């Protein structure tokens, strides 16, 4: 595999599918149009639902896009795993009643093994457990070694989005090697660790899910594929994670200039900051705005999370707005409208940061108040959690302020409260990351949930 930059990779994908007759469309806005079911566009197919149902005639039956997407159900994993992010670009090719499984599988394999020169022995393919047709196509026509085929259940390999077009899917995984794995003897495709990275999802949209939960066959089966540019970039650039690529490193390096510690010393904080400022920059450029509810509230929480991680690396003043230009510079080759939005985005981010710093200083007053009225020199778990949840105070910050006054913090009590909140959220959204989790309202992340806000 040859090191390839992000712009070239994106271009190679789009050109490849143009060579297969697909029409290249620009990314749709992150703000959904005529679709109340989503706060933000979360997949390549989401803005094209009406082409799939036939309600609107597509400009061509074959289309390829690089779609801006935002997903937040896994926000707490950002920076912990190699591959989670809230903003990502989804490379996709789509067929609206035109080509189907034979072509979609063969072309995916051709793109990986011929264009990107990925070694076939590193690739694994999962299919939906009942989809014998896909098994035969992959093994007999495309030539995948049957020992590299895995059958997975509905949770992983069936794409559906409420009612409407849906179907079994097939995912291509890249094996990053033993050393990236969890070490469990039964580590396998589908394991949650960083060894087998799911790179490309091919959805064979052949059914329609009716309101009553039954499935009917679509007259014209469709193809919807999606591959995260960040994941494929990290594989091709052999980055330790998605963040160790030219998509994120310029932002990380710019943040290093402002911080007390280097990237290597607190990778999580830098990764969160780099991810979140991309999300905010793209969303605001598409017309979204911070708000008390809905889409704007999601963005507000994302920004506040980044501010808090900034504190972890010693940045105690508004700074995210200064990273907007870095995001714009890095992405403007493909998203050429970004430079003209940059000033507006910077101003909005700065205003939001300033307001949040004010909230944080109220929290500081609150801690001092607790300290002044305590007689046992301990800040209990529920108070520490209230400071975190309501005022955005990371536990470390509470500990630091407490220690200055000779206090300790009941960290275990804090964790108990935190776990209870996470359990509540998890119960609300189902067990684990899955195709199904993508149905979940984008509001569904837990930290922090009830910030005071006073502008
Ligand atoms: N819609 C599918 C996904 O988001 C394939 O593009 O993974």
Image (cartoon, rainbow, N blue to C red):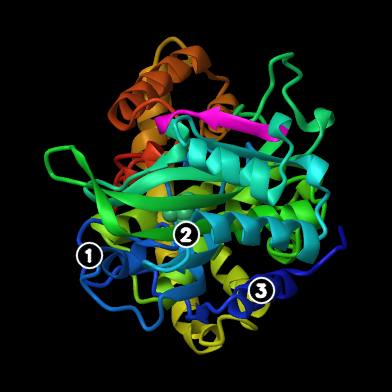
Q: Earlier in the sequence, mark 2 or mark 1?
A: 1
Badge 3 marks a residue whose secondary structure is helix
Q: Which residue is mark 3?
A: 16
Point out the residue furthest to the bottom here: 340
- What residue sits 45% from the left and 63% below the top? 44
Q: Earlier in the sequence, mark 2 or mark 3?
A: 3
Task: Please tell me in which quadrant of the rendered image residue 421 appears.
Answer: top left
Front in this rendered view, residue 224 or 279: 224
Q: Which residue is mark 2?
A: 100
Q: Residues within 10 Å of mark 1 (few under 14, many from 20)?
A: few
Q: Earlier in the sequence, mark 3 or mark 1?
A: 3
| For discs 2 and 3, the disc positioned in front in the rendered view | 2
Q: Which residue is mark 1?
A: 35
- What residue sits 41% from the left and 31% below the top? 155
**Is residue 280 something one can see in this rendering?**
no
Front in this rendered view, residue 154 or 70: 154
Q: CA distance from mark 2 to mark 1?
A: 27 Å
Quarter of the image containing the N terminus? bottom right
């Amino acid at each position: 595999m040859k090191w390839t930059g992000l712009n070239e990779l994106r271009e190679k994908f789009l050109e490849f599918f143009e060579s297969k007759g697909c029409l290249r469309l620009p990314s749709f806005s992150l703000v959904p149009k005529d679709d109340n079911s989503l706060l933000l566009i979360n997949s390549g197919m989401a803005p094209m639902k009406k082409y799939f149902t036939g309600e609107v005639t597509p400009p061509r039956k074959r289309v390829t896009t690089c779609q801006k997407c935002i997903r937040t159900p896994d926000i707490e994993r950002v920076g912990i795993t190699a591959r989670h992010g809230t903003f990502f670009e989804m490379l996709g090719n789509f067929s609206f009643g035109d080509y189907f499984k034979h072509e979609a599988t063969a072309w995916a394999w051709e793109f990986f093994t011929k264009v990107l020169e990925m070694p076939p022995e590193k690739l694994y393919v999962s299919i939906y457990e009942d989809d014998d047709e896909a098994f035969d196509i992959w093994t007999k026509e495309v030539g995948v070694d049957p020992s590299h085929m895995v059958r997975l259940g509905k949770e992983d390999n069936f794409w559906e989005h409420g009612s409407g077009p849906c179907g079994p899917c097939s995912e291509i995984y890249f094996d990053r090697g033993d050393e990236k794995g969890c070490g469990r003897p039964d580590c396998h495709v589908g394991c949650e660790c960083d060894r087998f990275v799911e790179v490309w999802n091919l959805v064979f949209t052949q059914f329609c899910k009716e309101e009553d939960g039954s499935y009917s066959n679509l007259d014209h089966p469709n193809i919807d594929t999606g591959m995260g540019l960040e994941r494929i970039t990290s594989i091709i650039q052999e980055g330790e994670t998605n963040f160790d690529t030219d998509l994120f490193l310029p932002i990380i390096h710019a943040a290093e200039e402002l911080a007390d510690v280097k990237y290597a010393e607190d990778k999580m904080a830098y990764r969160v900051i780099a991810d979140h400022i991309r999300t905010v920059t793209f969303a605001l450029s598409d017309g979204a705005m911070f708000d008390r509810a809905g889409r704007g509230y999601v963005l507000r929480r994302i920004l506040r999370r980044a501010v808090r991680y900034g504190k972890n690396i010693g940045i105690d003043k508004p700074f995210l707005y200064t990273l907007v230009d870095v995001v714009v510079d890095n992405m403007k080759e493909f998203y050429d409208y970004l430079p003209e939005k940059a000033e507006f985005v910077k101003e909005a981010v700065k205003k939001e940061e300033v307001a949040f710093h004010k909230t944080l200083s109220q929290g500081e007053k609150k801690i001092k108040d607790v300290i002044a009225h305590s007689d046992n020199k301990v800040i209990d778990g529920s108070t520490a959690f209230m400071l975190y949840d309501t005022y955005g105070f990371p536990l470390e910050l509470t500990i630091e302020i407490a220690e200055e006054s000779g206090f300790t913090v009941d960290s275990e009590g804090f964790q108990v409260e935190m776990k209870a909140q996470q359990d509540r959220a998890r119960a609300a959204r189902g067990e684990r990351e899955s195709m199904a989790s993508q149905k979940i309202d984008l509001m569904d992340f837990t930290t922090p949930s009830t910030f005071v806000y006073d502008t």
